[in-house]
Image: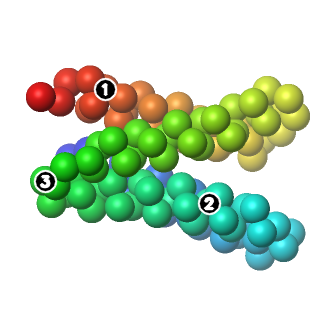
Amino acid sequence: MGIELPAYILGALTAGGGTMGYVRTGSIPSIVAGVTVGTLYLFGGYRIQNKQPWGVELALLASVVLAGSSIPRALRTQKPLPAGLSALALYGLYTFGNAFRTKK
């Protein structure tokens, strides 16, 4: 497996995390955001695996969205959950940003 594996892992983590956030607190924004970002990662991974266009870009978009929502919250609240999401986002930005940069 190549770069699709991180996309699948990040997709499962974000979708699962959003679902757990909803189950624990009843937060509709958690499930909507988690499932949306997770779907972007999973769909990007699927497209990468099948050598279809826009797979890396979808995974990179998911990372940008996740970073844009979690990093400011992590800096403001200093809580572990937004910090963990920020770490996932930064990993995705690094991984898919490099893949996008080196793509022909």
Q: Which residue is mark 2?
A: 34
Q: Nearer the viewer, residue 47 or 77?
A: 47
Q: Is residue 30 visible?
A: yes
What amino acid is at disc 3?
A: Lys
Q: Which residue is mark 3?
A: 51
Residue 23 shown left or right of residue 63 in the figure: right
Question: In the figure, residue 76 lies in which quadrant?
Answer: top right
Number of numbered labels in the structure image:
3
Q: Earlier in the sequence, mark 3 or mark 2?
A: 2
Residues at circles 1 and 2 in contact by the CB criterion of under 8 Å: no
Q: Position of residue 70 (x, y in %)?
A: 69, 39
Label 2 Cα neighbours within 10 Å, binned few <14 / some 14-19 / many ≥20? many
Residue at position x 86%, y 69% from top?
Answer: 25
> Three-letter amino acid code at disc 2?
Gly
Q: Which amino acid lies under the numbered mark 1 shown in the image of this protein?
A: Asn
Instruction: Tell me the residue that label 1 is attached to.
Output: 98
> Label 3 neighbourhood size at 10 Å, few (<14), some (14-19), many (20+)?
few
The kind of secondary structure element at disc 2 is helix
